[in-house]
Image (tube, rainbow, N blue to C red):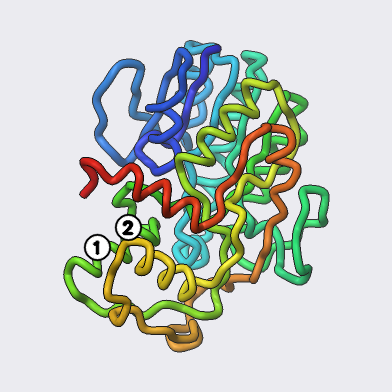
């Protein structure tokens, strides 16, 4: 199978590109990478994006590239729309011309948090601009007529130093002996990067289609998560300070969204880890990590 991964250089795109056991091509933008079948491209450039897809002729495009900083998306709505909607439109249009399938990485923030738990067929309703742009991307994918997977996920973590990687931030601050204020009112379904990459590739290999919640199996607030990280790695957790997010008045709302991943585990035949299992996986793969 031939796959084209967008967003190589980001957490998920990098992991999928490096671990997929297929003929693979990668697109990146804000990192300068070297290697076979890697190309720098701004996906907002419509003709160049379509031209690349027509040249590669992939069986699947795994579209990981996105603007994921929730507050930035709230503050610069035009730029967020360009990156998350227009670039997705360009990728989908390229796929239509090559009869390629697409796996589109989406978010739990397509929901508003008014339900106790969300399944794939629940009605969407966004409360922040990031969720809105990703939902618009979903609509483009679904209306295209090409075979698709929409993979909604949440709070990726693992052995990366990406600034959005919560586990890496906790471990780095512990080394520096710096205090970290952590919100008690932000809830997530933390998702191990290695786990989601493996599960997503399995869904693709099994020719699954439709919407999937590809998230970890724990639902936890940030402070509780931070304490678990501290305990798992034998840290002195006194540097973790619990606070309410209202202290900082962030630009974007963070709804409390609990994702049901039952369908994903059933169709992939694979387990999505709890936070405890994910941290144990990280501990077992510490060798050579910063």
Q: Position of residue 206 (x, y in %)?
A: 68, 22
Quarter of the image for residue 203 reads top right
Crowding at mark 1 (Cα within 10 Å: few <14, some 14-19, many 20+): some
Specify the farthest residue to the left.
Answer: 176
Q: Is residue 227 above or below residue 214?
A: below
In the visual, does 148 lie left or right of 286?
right
Q: Is residue 60 above or below residue 225?
A: above
Which image quadrant: the N terminus?
top right
Q: Is residue 48 above or below residue 215?
A: above
Name the residue tied to disc 2: 168
Name the residue tied to disc 1: 172
Q: Residue at x 55, y 15 (%)?
A: 58
Q: Position of residue 249 (x, y in %)?
A: 48, 83
In the visual, does 289 lie left or right of 193?
left
Crowding at mark 2 (Cα within 10 Å: few <14, some 14-19, many 20+): some
Q: Secondary structure at mark 2?
A: helix
Q: Is residue 171 above or below residue 60?
A: below
Q: Residue at x 28, y 62 (%)?
A: 171
Q: Secondary structure at mark 1?
A: helix
In the image shown, does 62 or 222 lie closer to the viewer? 222
Q: Position of residue 229 (x, y in %)?
A: 39, 64
In the visual, does 214 lie left or right of 162?
right
Q: Residue at x 24, y 68 (%)?
A: 173
Q: Are marks 2 and 1 in contact (CB under 8 Å)?
A: yes
Q: Residue at x 61, y 66 (%)?
A: 128
Q: Position of residue 209 (x, y in %)?
A: 74, 29
């Amino acid at each position: 199978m031939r796959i084209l991964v967008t967003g190589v250089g980001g957490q998920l795109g990098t992991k999928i590109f490096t671990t997929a056991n297929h003929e693979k091509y990668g697109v990146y933008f804000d990192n300068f990478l070297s290697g076979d079948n890697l190309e720098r491209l701004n996906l907002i450039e419509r003709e160049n994006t379509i031209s690349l897809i027509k040249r590669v002729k992939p069986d699947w495009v795994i579209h990981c590239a996105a603007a994921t900083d929730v507050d930035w998306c709230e503050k610069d709505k035009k730029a967020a729309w360009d990156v998350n909607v227009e670039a997705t439109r360009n990728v989908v249009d390229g796929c239509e011309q090559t009869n390629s399938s697409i796996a589109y990485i989406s978010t739990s923030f397509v929901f508003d948090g008014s339900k106790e738990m969300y399944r794939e067929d629940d009605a969407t309703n966004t409360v922040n601009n990031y969720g809105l742009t990703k939902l618009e991307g979903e609509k483009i994918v679904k209306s295209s007529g090409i075979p698709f997977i929409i993979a909604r996920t949440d709070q990726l973590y693992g052995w990366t130093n990406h600034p959005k990687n919560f586990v890496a931030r906790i471990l780095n601050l512990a080394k520096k002996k710096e205090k970290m204020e952590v919100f008690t009112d932000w809830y997530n379904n933390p998702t191990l990067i290695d786990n989601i990459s493996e599960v997503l590739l399995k869904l693709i290999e099994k020719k699954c289609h439709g919407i999937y919640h590809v998230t970890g199996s724990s639902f936890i607030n940030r402070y509780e998560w931070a304490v678990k990280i501290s305990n798992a790695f034998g840290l002195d957790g006194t540097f973790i300070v619990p606070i309410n997010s209202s202290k900082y008045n962030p630009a974007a709302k963070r709804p409390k969204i609990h994702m049901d991943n039952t369908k994903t585990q059933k169709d992939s035949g694979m387990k999505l880890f709890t936070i405890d299992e994910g941290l144990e996986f990280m501990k077992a793969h510490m060798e050579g990590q910063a």
